[in-house]
């Protein structure tokens, strides 16, 4: 399994696309694993101490052995990432309730 969006951002391997949450937009998110290593950052606080980080995980390359595919939504507060949502289940319960469906 490949590193997640937050780790890649911290190591300088990817620069998230910054989205203004006040502007309605249609977003298309490519997989985080690949040469276009793409993720989306949505600020919650203007000072950058809290934001959401979205990544799309698919069974490809380093992620080919993931149990499932889909969107992961991380909430980063004061530099600490927490999984907010995976497969429609809030928090860390998503992977434990659907272990074969969640990335």
Image (spheres, helix red, strand yellow):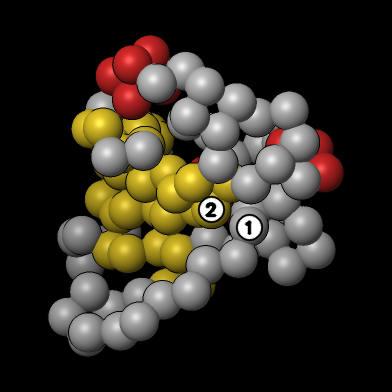
Specify whether 73 is left or right of 3.
Answer: left
Query: Depth check: 18 or 24 in front?
Result: 24
The quarter of the image holding the N terminus is: top right
Going by the image, does 9 lie left or right of 102? right
Dot 1 alpha-carbon crowd within 10 angstroms: few under 14, some 14 to 19, many 20 or more: many
Location of residue 87 with respect to 70 vertically, above or below? above
Q: Which residue is mark 1?
A: 31
Residue 15 on image: x %, y %: 60, 65
Q: Earlier in the sequence, mark 2 or mark 1?
A: 1
Q: Are marks 2 and 1 in contact (CB under 8 Å)?
A: yes
Q: Residue at x 53, y 61 (%)?
A: 39
- Could you say whether the residue bearing mark 2 is in a helix, strand or loop? strand
User: Residue at horizontal 53%, vertical 53%?
Assistant: 56
* Of 21 and 27, the residue lying toward us: 27
Residue 17 visible in the shown view: yes
Q: Which mark is residue 85?
A: none
Residue 85, percent across and down? 30, 39
Q: Which residue is mark 2?
A: 56
- Can you say whether 53 is above or below 68 in the image? below
């Amino acid at each position: 399994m490949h590193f997640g969006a937050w780790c890649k951002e911290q190591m300088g391997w990817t620069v998230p696309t910054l989205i203004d949450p006040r502007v309605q937009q249609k977003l298309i998110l490519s997989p985080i694993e690949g040469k276009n290593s793409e993720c989306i950052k949505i600020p919650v606080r203007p000072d950058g101490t809290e934001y959401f980080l979205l990544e799309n995980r698919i069974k490809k390359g380093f992620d080919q052995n993931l149990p499932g595919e889909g969107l992961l939504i991380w909430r980063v507060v004061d530099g600490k990432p927490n999984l907010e949502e995976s497969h429609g289940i809030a928090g860390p319960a998503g992977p434990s309730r659907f272990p074969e469906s969640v990335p």
